[in-house]
Image (spheres, grey):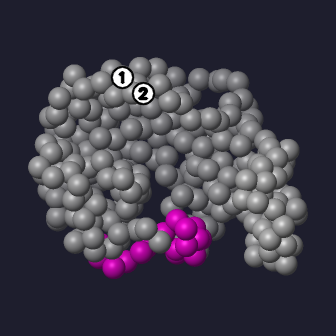
Amino acid sequence: MTAQKEPNYFSLCHGNMRFDPSTIGPAYHRDFVHDWNAYMDLFREAGEEQARGESSPVYLYDPFAADSIREQLPACRFVVLLRNPVDRAFSNYVLNLRARLEPERNFRKALNLEEQRIAQNWWWGFHYFKAGLYSEQLERYFTRFPREQFLILLYDQWRDDARATFQKVLSFIGVDEHFSPRLGKRFKESKVQNENLIKDVLDRDSLIKRLFKKTFSQRTRTKVKQYIAGKNSYKPVLDPESRLYLQERYQPEIGKLEDLLGQDLSHWLKRGEAVTK
C-alpha cells in the first residue's frame, strides 16, 4: 500500500476537481495526485512485489472515478469495506469537527444542510447521508467491471475478527495469506475540542503566540497545548433520536444493498444505544 493515504488520483486525473477544494482547506488537498507519473511514483518502492495498492474512499462515491479506473487499470481488483451507513455518517461528521472543517456543531443541522452544500460543490466528505448510499455506488462499478474483481467486506467483520478478514484480503489479491501482521493497535475514540479562545490564539499566528513561543521551550508549549486541549474536549455521541432518524432514511437503501450483495444487513437497522465514534 502507498505510504500516502487517499491520493484520489482517479477522481482528479482528467483535470476536473469536481469538488471545491476551499471547503476542505490546503492541508487536505495539497497531497492529491493529478498526474499519472506522479501516481506511479507512489508505488516506486514496491518494486516487483506481487500486489500494489492504495486507498481512496472517494472513488466509490465519485460518479466519474469508475470510468477513470477502467480506462487506465481495467484489470485491477477492488477491496470494498462497507460500514453501517448511520455510523459512517456520524464518524465522518466527527472527523470534520475534529479537523475544524465542520462549522456546524449540531449533527442534525449539518445533515439538513447537506443538499445546500452539495449544490455549492462542497467536498464529498460533507455529504454525510448521500455517501452512505452504497447500492447505487456499487452498481456503477458492477456495470463496468466483472464481479469477480471485487471483494465486498463489512466493517463489522473487520471489527469482530480483523485477522480472519485480513487473510480474506490477502487471498483475494493473490499474496501469501499466511502472513501475520500485528493487529493489536487500536485507535482511541475521537475527541473534539470545544470552541476555545485561548487555544485558538495559541494556534493562530498572533503576537501572543510569538511571545509564547519566545518565552517557553517546545516541550513546555506542547504540554500547555495538550493541557488546554484535554480540558476543553469531549467525545461526541450519536443520540438515539438521530440514529433512528437515519435508520429510517436508510432503510430502503439497506434493502437494495441486501438484494445486490445477497447478504442480511438487518443488524444495521437494530435499535441501539447511543454510541461514540
Find residue 134 and report its horizontal and vertical position in percent: 41, 45
Q: Secondary structure at mark 2?
A: loop
The quadrant where residue 12 appears: bottom left
The quadrant where residue 113 appears: bottom right
Dot 1 crowding, Cα within 10 Å, few <14, some 14–19, many 20+: some
Q: Earlier in the sequence, mark 2 or mark 1?
A: 1
Find residue 76 and report its horizontal and vertical position in percent: 17, 50
Cβ–Cβ under 8 Å for marks 2 and 1: yes
Residue under numbered circle 2 = 183
C-alpha span from label 2 to label 1: 7 Å
Q: Amino acid at mark 1?
A: Arg
Q: Amino acid at mark 2?
A: Leu
For residue 259, side relative to residue 173 (left or right): right
Residue 85 sits inside the magenta stretch: no
Residue at 11%, 49% (x, y): give it: 48
Dot 2 crowding, Cα within 10 Å, few <14, some 14–19, many 20+: few
Q: Secondary structure at mark 1?
A: helix
Find residue 30 and report its horizontal and vertical position in percent: 47, 72
Q: Which mark is residue 38?
A: none
Residue 25 sits inside the magenta stretch: yes
Residue at 20%, 51% (x, y): give it: 46
Q: Nearer the viewer, residue 109 or 173?
A: 173
Look at the image and give the residue range highlighted in magenta.
13-29
Residue under numbered circle 1 = 163
Residue at 62%, 35% (x, y): give it: 188
Placement of 98 over or under 179, stated as above or below: below
Res 144 visible: yes
Residue at 84%, 67% (x, y): give it: 215
Find residue 243 and report its horizontal and vertical position in percent: 67, 35
Quarter of the picture containing the C terminus is top right
For residue 103, side relative to residue 126 (left or right): right
